Image (cartoon, grey):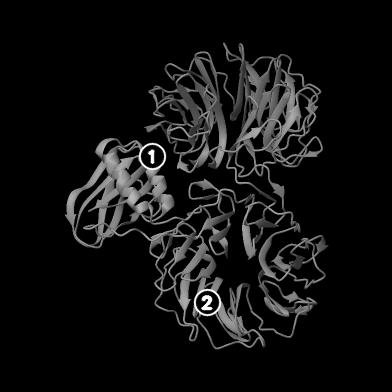
Amino acid sequence: MSCHPGGQAAGAAARDSNLRWLPRIVGPAFLLVIATVTWWSGASAQTLRDDFYVTDGAVNASALSGNTLYIGGTFTQVGPATGSFVPLDAGTGAPLSGFPKVAGSVFTMAPDGSGGWFIGGAFTAVGGTLRTNLAHILSDNSLSPWNPFANDAVLSIAASGGTVYVGGQFTSAGDSARNYVAALDATTGTATPWNPIADSFVRAMVLSGSVLYVGGDFTDFGVPPADTPRNKIAALDIATGIPTAWNPGANFPVRALAVSGNTVYAGGSFSGLGGQVRSRIGSVDATTGLATSWNPGASSDVRALVLNGSTLYAGGFFTTIGGQARNRIGALDATTGVVSAWNPNVSSASSSVLSIALSGGVVYAGGTFTVVGGQSRNNLVALNATTGAVNAWNPNSNASVSALGVSGSTVYAGGSFTSMGGQPRNKIAAVDTGTGAVTAWNPTANNTVNSLAVGGSTVYAGGIFTSIGGQTRNRIAALDAATGLATAWDPNANSDVRALIPSGSSVYAGGFFTTIGGQPRSDIAALDATTGLATSWNPSANGGVNALVLDGSTLYVGGAFTMLGGDARNRIATVDAGTGVLQPWNPNANDAVNAIAVGGGMVFIGGAFTSPRNKIASLDPSTGLPLSWNAAANGNVSALALSGTTLYVGGAFTSMGGQSRSNVAALDPSTAAATNWNPGPNGAVSTLALSIDTVHLGGAFTAVGFQPQSYVAAVSVQVNAAPPIPDGAGLTLLQQIRPNPFRASTVIRFSLASWQQVSLKIYDVQGREVASLIDNQRQSPGVHTVGFQRGRLASGVYVAFLKAGKAVDTRRIICIR
């Protein structure tokens, strides 16, 4: 069992999510929770903009100019943030609004019989509410309270009546131990007594009468000595969960199943099925389990099978099937195995078809591809069921589509995508901060963009590209802010450019180059803003330059160097912006400096160093000595932005300023304490751009809080002051739960500002108390630690609930085996 902590007491995102976990508590306990948690919820009011477009790859650099945010990185598309399960108009392909967004990946789906869908995958939230790998979305587009919690990915679903069957990689589902396959109550989400106990993954399932056919990686069901060997394919009695006598056996995983009458079709990675040689696709008799004579054979894995009358559609990684060239999708006669003339031709390299759905005369196919039938189609396509021709319908998914379903005039798609309906933008783009949408500005770089800066009507870009704005430009370029075209300015760097600052008649550049502007320059240079030629300014570093900040006539330089301007300077230094002469200021960092912020007489640096402070430091602007200010980050810092009384920090950390903070934080520049602002992106933050009311984040994240938002996000800066603490209540804070993850036991630490009556309880996601650690005991001021033993608790989500006087704090724990 391992567990992960939630947000801190003051974070609005954490508070809101806790409120969502506790509504099943009834009676006085429920009223207490609502009252006290609401008291804390006013402490933070940052809001994630859900209309702000996202990318399909990392954002490494950003620059804000007026109402335009320029972004650079590794991405190839920019589009609306839809999440990974989306309803699409069957006529236009446009995403339909009002649907709860899924944060994570959706691998499988099944209709609930009432217009809604059960979905499974590897996700953490739906519509901003915690849902781990399983969820139920109702016909009115609302999220059902159904919340079984599977502790690992769900790969297959079948629903019938009041039962939802699920298969996957989990060992716990519906509040019970269930190895790789389970039956869940469709209303409550709890596991039924049905429990086949597979010994490995279940990847495919289909219901037929009183039997659930399953395929996967397994070799056995049950517990020895009462176990039943079954290799990769089995039939489970839906009443007992016991495998029937049917036993075809396959020698490698079965990944797709379909049933028609007395025939079971199987696709996967196998070369043997039902006692016969069968290459990745075959059929077996539903009574005997023996392979039939049906034997198309495929050249590589088969991942999807869908029957339509006498035709079986197959999708996968193959390039031949039924003895004919068919790239990744084909149509087979369900009786003879002969491949039809239908040939859409998913021809892009390294492509696959992972899902198929039919409606009327249309075959919808999803997977990982970019070209179908000679036309550009990203990961999702509609095909004429008779001719195989590509329809005009083009949702443009930014990543793989693994699950498809159709209901009326709506096509439902699930996968690992984060956006549908985006626009191609290679490595560089502009977003209108008013609308959140991508603009028409489209320079198109052929490789990664690592730095951006704006000077007047020019956007400067640096990175590892060799073409941008329609011209050959080696690693540095100037682009027209209106047209996106490259100007004549062409310094021609021979390696990566990581930092840029336009200032007057010069453009300062830092990176990993040895020549730029037609001259030898080691990692740092000043370029003529008109000609692009290197000026005589030449401090020369012996290692990469990651950060440049200009403050008056002083240029702050951070990076990986140990020499600058001919003298020893470890990773951070200042030079005269006019002469390039090294200044005496010498803080001496022991590892890379990635970011610098200067303002109001303050100098902050962030990076990978552990001296003069851990990852982030405040330096005396005169002496370079570290101030007592100590935010004590536990991971690298990549970005800093100073705005008035707040220092925003981005990087790859989980603790900052004495609080739990995931990859981004806001610090008091005087005290180093973290403010209540706490968006919680799930991956590293590499760049920050500030406006008056918004912090723009760029990085490697795919969600912010419990909302899907990949690689770029806009979060409000507004943080409300916490209301006064009610009379008699001391300051209460659940500081940490460690170890976390934990298997057998952990320690919960909290602090009190004064003597208080304290209760510390553990609740499950249904709001049931599962442990009482402190029961209304009077506790002294200071830090307290309390041990918590797992005991017989099942894997799942729990809430630590601390009440001290009239104040309350809660914290999430996610427990898995």
Quadrant including the C terminus: top left
Q: Is residue 810 left or right of residue 157?
A: left
Q: Is residue 201 left or right of residue 482?
A: left
Q: Is residue 239 left or right of residue 509?
A: left
In whole angstroms, how far apart are the C-alphas of marks 1 and 2? Answer: 46 Å
The residue that appears at 31% across and 50% down in the rendered structure is: 746
The residue that appears at 30% across and 44% down in the rendered structure is: 33
Q: Which residue is mark 2?
A: 599
Whether residue 521 is visible: no
The residue that appears at 64% across and 34% down in the rendered structure is: 88
Q: Residues within 10 Å of mark 2 (few under 14, many from 20)?
A: few
Q: Residues within 10 Å of mark 1 (few under 14, many from 20)?
A: many
Q: Which residue is mark 1?
A: 796
Whether residue 600 is visible: yes
- Dividing the picture into quadrants, the one containing residue 769 is top left
The location of residue 31, given as percent across then percent down, is 28, 41
Reply above or below: 598 against 780: below
Question: Under tag 2, what secondary structure?
Answer: strand
Farthest residue to the left: give it: 778
Which of the two discs, 1 and 2, labels the residue nearer the N terminus? 2
Reply above or below: 405 against 291: below
**Amino acid type indicated by mark 2:** Gly
Q: Which mark is residue 193?
A: none
The location of residue 619, given as percent across then percent down, is 47, 79
The residue that appears at 68% across and 30% down in the rendered structure is: 90
**Amino acid type indicated by mark 1:** Gly
Q: Is residue 202 left or right of residue 768?
A: right
The location of residue 289, given as percent across then percent down, is 58, 15
Question: Under tag 1, what secondary structure?
Answer: strand
The location of residue 304, given as percent across then percent down, is 65, 28
